[in-house]
Image (tube, grey):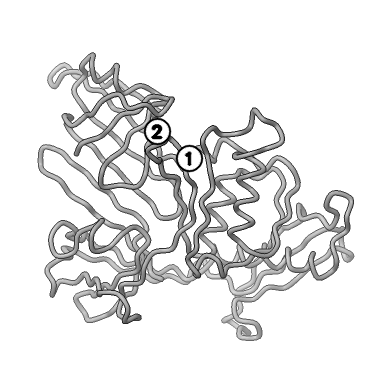
Amino acid sequence: MELSIFDSNLLHIAIVDVFDSCIWTDRYCGYGDFEIYTAMKSNMRNLLQADRYLTYKDSDHVMIIEDRQVASDIENGDHLIVTGRSLESILERRIIWGQTVLTGNLQNGIQKLLNENAISPTVVARAIPNLVFEASTDPIITALTIDAQFTGDNLYDTIKKLCSVNDIGFKITLTDTGLLVFKLYAGIDRSYAQVLNPYVVFSRKNENIINTNSLESKKDLKTVALVAGEGEGATRKTETVEINPGGYSGLSRRETFTDARDISSTISGRTLTAAEYTAQLKQRGVEDLASKIIIKSFEGQADTLHMYKYGEDFFMGDIVQLTDDYGSEFTERVTEMVISQSTSGTSANPTFSIV
């Protein structure tokens, strides 16, 4: 692996390609992270300083150096351990400063959150230099809508939740001119469910998956949410949200309570209509139920260096086909990629999530 180092002003400093090991992890909906483990040398300690940036040619993402640790060992000598997270983590440094209502197009809503709290906020000191928003033209993204309200929430957590609920990803990339570009995206479907794109299939038959482990759990499933907003006691405003309206009763009905007292019916002196307030309560219920679903997972150590190469045949967020040893088919999204290099060689292991 060859990593490029940039200083805090995003000016290129050097290239690092000699270390004991390096683990680079990209994620579809959230920040990635990295770890470099190398023998303690003055030049490495001087290069790998906190707040500097790292790039890797096979990744869209940019890492920020955050932690440095020196591990002393009499037998093996001293080693430097450097870790950090990708650029998406800078959104964690901002909160949603004022009461903000989002209605209509989801992408426009996320852009509003970024503009008001990181790109061009009223308080100039809150602006993140060089951060810009690039709108997606993907119909999957542009068709999404939202009705929600936020006050004081962490900006990163809010955007991550909105993207996760809608099964889309987000990333911040670095341009040659030093711009930090935020963009929403959705992967390409390469499964058997479509006919437009070449299939990407991982299976023992194709000799590109080494081991598998599948799980299905309904333990945390909730199907109905009672969402409670403003008010006290019997006068408190409530709405019922169901995964499948009218489809659950008896033992199949699994209820949860969603406290949405923070959603206000008065915004900047204007009182929301009953329909607007109801829509925001229901949105909160949808978000809550989205985190309490049937857990289905299919884990497999896949070979992504030969038959299908990551970055050429499939990319982060793409939907692929997996087959286990018993003939079961799984349509899964690539949500994480761990690229590692050590004395034992290089590997690229994806993590899949059932769509």
Residues packed near mark 2 inside 10 Å, few (<14), some (14 to 19) or many (20 plus): many
In front of the other: 355 or 11? 11
Identity of the residue furthest to the top in this view: 42
Identity of the residue furthest to the front in this view: 177
Q: Quadrant of residue 317?
A: bottom left
Q: Are marks 2 and 1 in contact (CB under 8 Å)?
A: yes
Residue positioned 23% across, 30% down in the render: 37
- Pointer 2: what residue? 64
* Residue 257 visible (yes or no): no
Residue 210 rendering spot, x and y as whole percentages: 16, 63
Image vertical order of residue 310 relative to residue 19, above or below: below
Amino acid type shown at disc 1: Ser
Residue 89: give its label.
1
Residue positioned 19% across, 72% down in the render: 203
Image vertical order of residue 305 relative to residue 23, above or below: below
Residue 42 rendering spot, x and y as whole percentages: 23, 14
In front of the other: 334 or 76? 334
Number of marks in the rendered image: 2
Image vertical order of residue 94 relative to residue 321, above or below: above
- Quadrant in which the N terminus is drawn: top left
Q: Is residue 42 left or right of residue 167?
A: left
Which type of secondary structure does the marked residue at label 2 adopt? Answer: strand
Residue 75 rendering spot, x and y as whole percentages: 12, 19
- Quadrant in which the C terminus is drawn: bottom left
